[in-house]
Image (cartoon, rainbow, N blue to C red):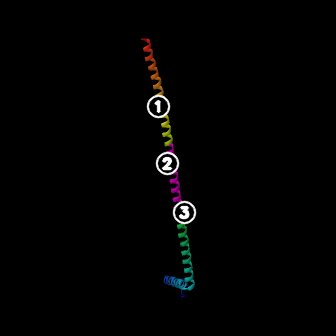
Amino acid sequence: MAKSALPTLADRLRAAQEARQAQLQRAKAAAASPEAAERREARQAIVAARNLRIATRKAEEEARLEREAAERAAAEAEAAAARAAALQAEQQTRAAEETKRARQEAAEQAEREAILAARRLGRKAKKRRGR
């Protein structure tokens, strides 16, 4: 009887093991080759350059944010100073108006008192004449 052309399970397992070993040997040889080392170094240089660019951009962004925060703080301080000056000017204006109003009321009161005093004197004089 002739041997069958179909491989047995052991033959298939052995062939798979040999293929894995061959693939492993090819990978080790490729990793040990000078071209692979050059490619790794080139990738590492690219990664280092990328990380440097990212760090530079991050530092620039932080500096920009700090600058904007300082500008915002200065603008807010300036606005607060302007509001305080406007409030003080308004208070001074109100105080001046109040003083003016008080003087005017005092003058009107004095004028009323003078009119009343003149009337009283007129009545007293009339009483004296009438006697």
What is the C-alpha distance between the residues marked 3 and 2? 30 Å
Q: Kindly check if marks 1 and 2 are in contact, taking CB atoms under 8 A apart as contact.
A: no
The location of residue 74, given as percent across then percent down, is 52, 56
* Tag 2: amino acid: Ala
* Tag 3: amino acid: Arg
Name, please, the residue furthest toward the bottom: 1
* Picture disc at residue 106: 1
Q: Secondary structure at mark 3?
A: helix
The location of residue 21, given as percent across then percent down, is 51, 84
Q: Nearer the viewer, mark 1 or mark 3?
A: 1
- At label 2, counting other C-alpha atoms closer than 10 Å, the crowd grade (few under 14, some 14-19, many 20 or more) is few
Task: Judge by depth and name the residue closer to the eye, 64 or 37.
Answer: 64
Start-end of magenta stretch: 63-90
The correct choice, above or below, for 4 with respect to 77 in the image is below
What is the C-alpha distance between the residues marked 1 and 3? 62 Å
* Picture disc at residue 64: 3
Q: Secondary structure at mark 2?
A: helix
- Which residue: 50% across, 36% down? 100
Task: Judge by depth and name the residue closer to the eye, 45 or 18.
Answer: 45
- Which residue: 44% across, 20% down? 121
Give the mark, 1 or 3, whose residue is nearer the N terminus: 3
- At label 3, counting other C-alpha atoms closer than 10 Å, the crowd grade (few under 14, some 14-19, many 20 or more) is few
> Is residue 75 inside the magenta stretch?
yes
Give the mark, 3 or 2, whose residue is nearer the N terminus: 3
- Which residue: 52% across, 67% down? 59
Quarter of the picture containing the C terminus is top left
* Picture disc at residue 84: 2
Q: Kindly check if marks 1 and 3 are in contact, taking CB atoms under 8 A apart as contact.
A: no
Q: Nearer the viewer, mark 3 or mark 2?
A: 2
- At label 1, counting other C-alpha atoms closer than 10 Å, the crowd grade (few under 14, some 14-19, many 20 or more) is few
Q: Secondary structure at mark 1?
A: helix
> Is residue 42 inside the magenta stretch?
no
